[in-house]
Amino acid sequence: MTSPRTEASVDQGPVDLVEWYFTQGWTDGFPVVPPTPRKVDAMVEALGGNPGELEARVPPRWGSLTREVLATNMVLAGCLPTYAPLVRAAMLALCSAHFNLQGVQSTTHMAAPLMVVNGPIRDEIGMNAGANVFGSGNRANATIGRAIRLILLNVGGAWPGDLDKSTLGHPGKYSFCIAENEQASPWAPYHVEQGFGPNDSTVFCIATEGPHSVTNHVADDPEGILDSLVSAMSTIAHNNAVSSGSCAVVIGPEHAATIAGKDWTRSDVRRYLWSQTTNTYDDISFKNRYGKIYNRNLPKWYRREPGARIPIVPTPDDIHLFVAGGDAGRFSAFLPGWGHMTAPVLRAIDGHAPEGHIRCIDGSCEL
């Protein structure tokens, strides 16, 4: 990706910059904001100046993400300068070795990086954690997620059909960024549970499919609500079933209030979901219909015995649970992960690691 400062030499006469960026292949399919020098300079300043400083190398093309290139893609996406530290933190998390962005970028699976934001920065930049949280209508959520995708395209080179081999993809490959609804949550915020302070701002990154709706308008007890989630999780068709790894669960505020009203903690919820998923080795192996060639690709820790129950992820802690969404409607969501080929990463916006965390490298914490 070249500097936006070359745009003046494109044509001696008037030029439609939006159309010109389409011809350059610098868009995600939607029109972009022309990255004028003034806008890029303001974004670079928000990143700390020094436009040539290298922030990361982005796979699979391993393009150089300098501050100027980072700033340019944020302007293209429609970001404000106040979003810049969050976008940088997300990219550093995605480019950490734990996440395996090269695999996520080039897999035939539909996984896309989901970002979940916690801490004061949510309100400071006006993120949506409530109604329609995964949908449209909020500039911060939409353009932060879009900036990440433009960087993955323009710097990482993961263009569909070229280095991006995804068979189907999903709409989160345009923008996939939400905030946890800390105000509506009956539990401590996700990042606090992981060792950060309430006043820390963080971004959590995990490769997932799109949200799978879970509806339960009748249960007035935790088990009833969570059994609906268990049903959504207990299939053999998503990647966690056959590749283990990590997944995400988003509990709607009404469901969360009912569950916590019976004194269940976030840990209780994770453990219940993990222990009650009902896949068996017979299900996953198709009763050995396809023999050892298929079965050898299943995770080594699966008990290869008739009737053996196979949890969809290795431990309850591999179910990453958040509270988000509007205060009306008894809905939650399950987001299957990509499998054991990737590890979720949590990173503070300012790059510091929680004290005593043993799996943090350069500010990125493997979970």
Image (cartoon, rainbow, N blue to C red):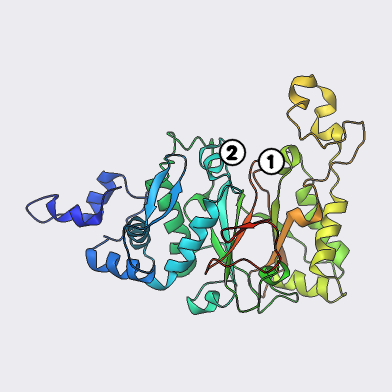
Q: Quadrant of the C terminus?
A: bottom right
With respect to residue 248, does 221 lie above or below?
A: below
How crowded pointer 2 is (Cα within 10 Å; few <14, some 14-19, many 20+) is rated as: many
How crowded pointer 1 is (Cα within 10 Å; few <14, some 14-19, many 20+) is rated as: many
Which residue is drawn at the image coordinates 68% and 69% (left, top)?
355
Q: Position of residue 90 (x, y in %)?
A: 51, 59
Q: Return the residue at label 1.
A: 239
Q: Is residue 101 left or right of residue 22?
A: right
Residue 184 visible (yes or no): yes
Write down the quadrant of residue 305 in the picture. Answer: top right
With respect to residue 173, does 242 lie above or below?
A: above
Compare residues 160 and 2 and report the one nearer the observer: 2
Q: Is residue 257 left or right of residue 112?
A: right
| Residue 109: mark in rendering | 2
Among the two numbered marks 2 and 1 on one chain, the one whose residue lies closer to the N terminus? 2
Q: Is residue 40 left or right of residue 214?
A: left
Which residue is drawn at the image coordinates 56% and 35% (left, top)?
108
Measure the C-alpha gap from mark 2 to mark 1. 9 Å
With respect to residue 178, does 151 lie above or below?
A: above
Q: Position of residue 12 (x, y in %)?
A: 7, 52
What residue type is disc 1 on? Asn
Which residue is drawn at the image coordinates 74% and 37% (left, top)?
242
| Residue 150: mark in rendering | none
What residue type is disc 2 on? His
Confirm or deny contact between disc 2 and disc 1 (CB under 8 A): yes
Residue 238 visible (yes or no): no
Q: Residue furthest left?
A: 12
Q: Is residue 292 left or right of residue 119?
A: right
Q: Position of residue 366 (x, y in %)?
A: 65, 54
